[in-house]
Amino acid sequence: MTMTFEWILLAFLTLIIIYHHVIYTSIMIWLGRHRSADTSECERNRHFPSIALVMPAHNEELCIEAKLANLLMLDYPAGQLSIWVCCDGCTDQTARIIENWQDKFNAAGIALRVIEETTNHGKLARINQLMTQAKQTSELIALSDVSALISIDALKQAAANFHNPKTGAITCCYLLAEATPGEDQYWQWQNNIRYAESRIGNVMGGNGAFYIMRSKLFAPLPEDTINDDFMLPMMVIKQGYNVIFNQSINSIELTPTDTKNNHQRRQRIGAGNLQQLIRCRFLFKCRQYKTSWLFTSGKGLRTVMPFILVSYFAISSFMAWQGVEIAKGLLALQSSVYLLALLPLTGIHSRPTDKLHYFVGGYFSSLLGMLRYLGGQFRQGWRHLPPLSNYQTQSTQALKRSSDIILSLIGFILTLPLWPILASLIKIDSPGPVFYHQLRVGRITEDKAELFNVIKFRTMTHNAENQSGAVWATQNDPRITPIGRFLRATRLDELPQFINVLRGDMSLIGPRPERPEMCGDLQNALPFYLERTAGLRPGITGLAQVNQGYDSCLDDVKNKIAWDHAYAVALGSPLQWLRMDAYIIFKTVHIMVSKRGQ
């Protein structure tokens, strides 16, 4: 019975993978390549609706002049066009550059409205702000990234499409000024697919480089929305209007993406895809059956495909282990594809492997993004500001968290027989509970400082700080019990913190977690104190702990800051992290065996 179920599941997943990647994609690309010539209505109809082009900007001094020149040259009646720019907490010269262009727009008769905000609230907040204001004055609202140039006749082309009362939004071709072979191939396919979607039903989303919609259809998006350029067109469809693709409008992305930025961007897209799959459930019930089919076959399957591929590999491996020959062949095929996709990372490049690396890497990034979303990240939507953990490579973060879970689970299981013995000794030695819970400061992110209750074996008398409050331990501290001294010397009092690590409160290795009531004073006295845990979970042990021990005064903490930041530097690459963690683990074991802990 079990084998039958495995065969059914394997066959079902095989069909889904083939359908999405081969059948559906091939049909859409074929339809997209056979494009009919557009019949322009611009010359036949001289009505030009008022258009507001909105553009959030954050530290865009490298691109803003090229963008302003592009907008100034747009072929559209000046009196019907207004440009709305919001400088979202810019700390560079973006606002000053825009100010210098104000006279040129005035001379051209184009209204240029600039809003300077001193704090960074993120792209979505500024889109909601700008569009809410602009919809009061304009029939259409266009959105465009600062880093993208658009066709000179883009607005005239779009205005012509809106003569059809059922048209609610328009998207365009997306091109890259500098693209890798994988990127170039991907966006060729995407442009063809979007054209085919437009012919069949509706385009599934837009691209931030340029899209335009009827202003009356806009409603502010929730603050945690990740992919605004997808959700806004989908809200147009929800209201009964069509989203179409205009092949005559081009948007060209000027800024090339390096490997790290591309990985982060595709994580954001993956998280956004999962979010929009949940929020666009109405498309599955849509009476426009073609639109429902397009969404399910395209965006829907693309979103869940990383989970499908992981499941497919796991099932194939399990069935191959059982001796099923077909499963062995499928496992070998998958392994070969993934190994070929890794070749560019070793410096071996070819056009086929570079393309394969781009596509497989995209699924990997998307999977990480979705897991981060399920883990509660992206609650504030997408921000221009890089995360505080940006100094850590994504591979290091993934490997560090994986090793935390695996090693903590092993440590918990191996040391579990000691727990009843230690608990009995603690109870015999002094009255009070076996475990000690204390509020500590955990990882600090962009928008909050995490707090958690650390779990340790009790080493002091019960309620030791009731009278004194939060104070540092001292040499021969009278509050420490006899068994407590042994537990501290051997670091066995830290064993319950394996639970904190498994819960995600802590890491095996990292800075020492401090009490909230002491953090404020320490930050005032010691510069860069709180940055110790910026984007980094505190640890059971760490570079500072193995080199210095417990804190007994301000100077001890001051010395530890250097050790903690030195550890953070080691997270810049997986190899450096591995060497550092191996050294700390070895030294921690040595301290435990030699009873040099404090």
Image: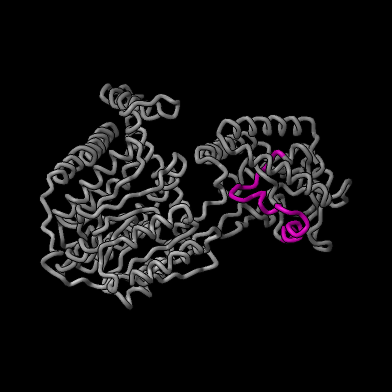
- In the rendered image, residue 300, in percent from the top left (x then y), is placed at 27, 50
Query: As drawn, is 225 to the left or to the right of 544?
Result: left
Query: Residue furthest toward the bottom?
Result: 136
Residue drawn at (20%, 37%) of the image: 22
Picture coordinates of residue 32 (x, y %)? 16, 46
Is residue 204 visible in the rendered image? The answer is yes
Residue name at image x 51 percent, y 63 percent: 96
For the residue pair 187 and 482, the one nearer the viewer reads as: 187
Residue 475 sits above or below residue 517 on the image: above
Q: Quadrant of residue 407?
A: top right
Residue 224 on the magenta segment:
no
Residue 532 forms part of the magenta stretch = yes
Q: Where 215 sits versus 507, above or below?
A: below
Answer with left or right where residue 266 lies relative to residue 198: right
Q: Residue furthest front?
A: 107
Where 238 falls versus 180 (above or below)?
below
Residue 500 seen by the camera: no
Identify the image's colour scheme: rainbow, by chain, secondary structure or one colour: one colour
Percent x, y for residue 74?
A: 29, 61
Location of the C terminus by quadrant is top right
Residue situated in front as seen by the camera: 503 or 387? 387
Residue at coordinates 25% horizontally, 69% vertically from top-left?
77
Q: Quadrant of residue 521?
A: bottom right
Quadrant in the picture for the N terminus: top left
Q: Which one is nearer the viewer's eye here, 267 or 398? A: 267
Question: Which stretch appears magenta?
Answer: 517-543
